[in-house]
């Protein structure tokens, strides 16, 4: 189960460099995942609906939610539209390729990407609008903003595509270290700027319209004597508010920077391959060992830490009211108190891994499991 649910693929050769994954299973680390223990639940999950759409294999597929639809995909090439209230399938289309990234939505488009660089854009009624080809395997598709689709590919490139026809408007390239962690990390698009975390600990701000670099900084410098020890990649999406943007690196640091100039506000040592959530005055982080931490966003000072999910491949947290919601490699949803990190509720799904964070859906949450279970849940 643990090998199968490692979010990143086995060691492969790619674009002249190597990518690694599966480091965090018990067989790789010699450390066993924590056993879940019973506790007095102070909140309760309820399942509003459950739907099966087919598995995601080892790809990290994230559903998308709009005001009147849920879109989700499986690795076999199928894309679905579902009713957000009932979970009933509205339509199903076959992209014709193995889906490795998606779903991206916005401005009337629904997008998926393929393992051979394929890109397909559908209308909200399932009609194919256009197809395009990226430079290599598509790992992430950002929501459509201002008529531009930002696509991340396995060769380390970021591309801005015209949402009307898929033609490339710009492309950002950067140097790739000899060894990197395979990552499906997304980007944050705000105020006409694309914020992206990159291998070797780099954080960059790029103009959405032109692809011109506005500023770049290094969150974490590589350290150590071997290539494995020196990996310090940002493998998750940056997060931001009106004043700052924050990112975290594997085997590195978490740091926040001013939004406009990229000047450092604060940093501290921390390793995460899952990512961070910025909510109100706090940063919530899942570290490499699966612990969930809360930090003050203005200083990085620690507020609390919960390590009860040690080595359970805990997802990045999702903030929901007074709680943080995370999933794990056995398909459990956990609710933690945002105040002190204590366990509040637990829900068992289909037993397969959750590779992405829960997301907002109609006053509740939506989660997708590796075996293709879609769950609409509430917490009260």
Image (cartoon, grey):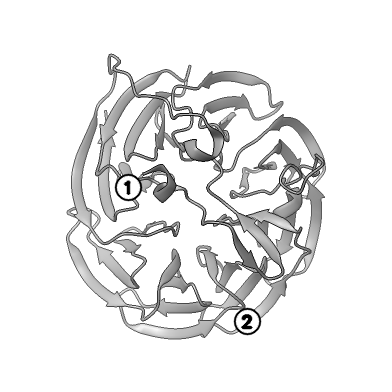
Q: Which quadrant of the figure has residue 156? A: bottom right
**Could you say where residue 27 lies in the image, as x and y percent from the top left?**
49, 39
Q: For mark 1, does the 10 Å Cα neighbourhood hold few (<14), some (14 to 19), or many (20 or more) residues?
A: many
Question: Residue, x 17% and y 54% (percent of image)?
Answer: 86
Residue 119's tag is none
Residue 278 showing in the rendered view: no
Q: Residue at x 64, y 68 (%)?
A: 14
Query: Could you tell me how many numbered marks the image carries?
Result: 2
How far, Cα to Cα, is label 1 from label 2?
32 Å
Task: Classify mark 1: helix, strand or loop.
Answer: strand
Residue 285 percent across, percent down from the top left: 56, 33
Q: Is residue 210 left or right of residue 36?
A: right
Seen in the image, is 40 located left or right of residue 22? Answer: left
Q: Earlier in the sequence, mark 1 or mark 2?
A: 2
Q: Residue at x 32, y 82 (%)?
A: 127
Residue 217 placement (x, y as % from top left): 81, 49
Q: Quadrant of residue 11?
A: bottom right
Is 174 on the left or on the right of 122, as rendered? right
Q: Residues within 10 Å of mark 2 (few under 14, many from 20)?
A: some
Q: Quadrant of the C terminus?
A: top left
- Quarter occupied by residue 44: top left
Q: Name the mark on residue 168.
A: 2
Q: Is residue 95 above or below residue 349?
A: below
**Which secondary structure, mark 2?**
strand
Quadrant the N terminus occupies: top left
Q: Which residue is painted at 31% across and 46% down in the image?
A: 352
Badge 1 is on which residue? 366
């Amino acid at each position: 189960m643990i090998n199968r649910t490692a979010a990143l693929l086995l060691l492969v050769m790619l674009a002249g460099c190597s990518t690694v994954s599966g480091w965090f299973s018990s067989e790789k680390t010699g450390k066993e995942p924590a056993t879940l223990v019973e506790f007095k639940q102070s909140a309760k999950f309820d399942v509003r609906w459950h739907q099966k759409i087919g598995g995601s294999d080892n790809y990290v597929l994230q559903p998308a939610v709009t005001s009147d639809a849920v879109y989700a995909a499986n690795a076999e090439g199928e894309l679905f539209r579902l009713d957000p209230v009932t979970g009933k399938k509205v339509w199903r289309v076959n992209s014709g390729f193995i889906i490795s990234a998606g779903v991206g939505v916005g401005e009337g488009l629904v997008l998926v990407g393929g393992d051979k660089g394929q890109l397909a854009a559908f209308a909200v009624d399932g009609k194919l609008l256009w197809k395009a080809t990226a430079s290599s395997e598509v790992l992430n598709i950002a929501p459509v903003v201002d008529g531009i689709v930002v696509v991340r590919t396995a060769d380390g490139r970021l591309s801005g595509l015209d949402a009307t026809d898929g033609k490339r408007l710009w492309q950002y390239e950067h140097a790739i270290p000899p060894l990197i962690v395979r990552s499906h990390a997304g980007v944050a698009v705000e105020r006409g700027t694309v914020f992206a975390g990159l291998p070797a600990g780099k954080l960059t701000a790029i103009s959405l319209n032109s692809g011109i670099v506005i500023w770049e900084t290094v969150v974490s410098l590589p350290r150590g004597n071997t290539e494995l020890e020196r990996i310090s990649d940002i493998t998750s999406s940056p997060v931001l508010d009106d004043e700052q943007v924050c990112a975290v690196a594997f085997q590195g640091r978490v740091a926040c920077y001013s939004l406009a100039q990229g000047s450092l506000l604060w940093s501290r040592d921390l390793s995460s391959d899952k990512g961070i959530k910025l909510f109100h005055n706090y940063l919530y982080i899942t570290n490499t060992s699966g612990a969930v931490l809360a930090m003050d966003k203005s200083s990085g000072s620690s507020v609390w830490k919960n390590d009860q999910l040690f080595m359970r491949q805990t997802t990045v947290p999702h903030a929901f009211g007074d709680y943080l919601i995370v999933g794990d490699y056995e398909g459990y949803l956990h609710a933690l108190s945002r105040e002190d990190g204590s366990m509040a509720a637990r829900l068992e799904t289909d037993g397969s891994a959750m590779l992405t964070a829960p997301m907002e859906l109609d006053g509740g949450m939506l989660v997708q499991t590796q075996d293709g279970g879609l769950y609409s849940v509430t917490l009260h």
